[in-house]
Each structure stands twice: as C-alpha cells, then as structure tokens.
Image (spheres, rainbow, N blue to C red):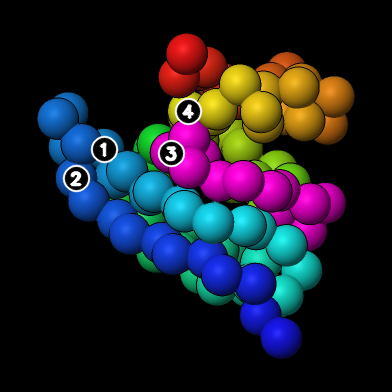
Amino acid sequence: MATSLELSTRPGPDGTAVVTAVGEIDMSNADKFQDALSQAAAGGPVVVDLTRVEYLDSAGVHVLFAHAPGLRLIASPLLVPVLAISGLSDVTSVRDDA
C-alpha cells in the first residue's frame, strides 16, 4: 500500500520551479516523487520544499541525490539531520525553515 504523499509544483518568485511535498516519502511512492522532480527539472534548477514531510527514507534520499546538482532544499528541523548525515547537504543547498 502506498504511503500518503501529496506533490505540487508552482513557479517561485524568481521563476524557478518549486516542488512541495506533503506527507511521507518512502519506497512506496519514490517513483511518484522522482517523476515530479524530473518534470520540474526539465525547466532548470528546482527548489524542493520538504517542510511538511514527516518521514523520508533511503528511497527518497536516493531520488534527491539523483537530482542534487540542480536542487535547493528547504527542510524542517526534523529532516535537516537526515539530509546532513546522508551527505546531501554536502552536494546541494539545504535551508532550515526554522
């Protein structure tokens, strides 16, 4: 059974695509997350708003790594340690929403 994940994409103030994720990102919905990031990245750099993500497993981290060079991440204090430990914060911009 797929875990609940809502994704939306909108243009940011500077025209960069902003993908907002709400819920949990895990192996049951990582393909959906991958598709959303791929579509958004077709137009250039992408901001990924993870501030309302409650859970991020290795499948979600893998998707983020696949797109890391063109991503800027906004994360909740809950996810910042996960992004740091995984090494994502070493290869892309991570901003804490706090």
Q: Amino acid at mark 2?
A: Pro
Q: Is residue 69 left or right of residue 85?
A: left
Residue assigned mark 2: 11
Q: CA distance from mark 4 to mark 1?
A: 14 Å
Q: CA distance from mark 4 to mark 2?
A: 15 Å
Is disc 4 placed on a helix, strand or loop? Answer: strand
Is disc 1 placed on a helix, strand or loop? Answer: loop
Dot 3 and dot 1 residues touching (CB under 8 Å): no
Q: CA distance from mark 2 to mark 1?
A: 6 Å
Is disc 2 placed on a helix, strand or loop? Answer: strand
Q: Amino acid at mark 4?
A: Ile
Q: Which residues are magenta?
A: 49-60
Is disc 3 placed on a helix, strand or loop? Answer: strand
Q: Which mark is residue 16?
A: 1
Magenta span: chief secondary structure? strand
Q: Which mark is residue 49?
A: 3
Please identify, in this view, whether the residue under mark 4 or under mark 2 is nearer the observer.
Answer: 4
Q: At 20% from the left edge and 36% from the top edge, which residue is drawn?
A: 12
Question: Which comes sooner in the sequence, label 3 or label 1?
Answer: 1
**Is residue 56 inside the magenta stretch?**
yes
Name the spot of residue 57 as percent of width and height, x first.
Answer: 79, 52
Q: Nearer the viewer, residue 45 or 77?
A: 77
Q: CA distance from mark 3 to mark 1?
A: 12 Å
Question: Which comes sooner in the sequence, label 3 or label 4?
Answer: 3
Residue 38 appears in view: no
Q: Which mark is residue 74?
A: 4
Q: Amino acid at mark 1?
A: Thr
Dot 3 and dot 4 residues touching (CB under 8 Å): yes
Q: Amino acid at mark 3?
A: Asp
Q: Is residue 88 left or right of residue 46?
A: right
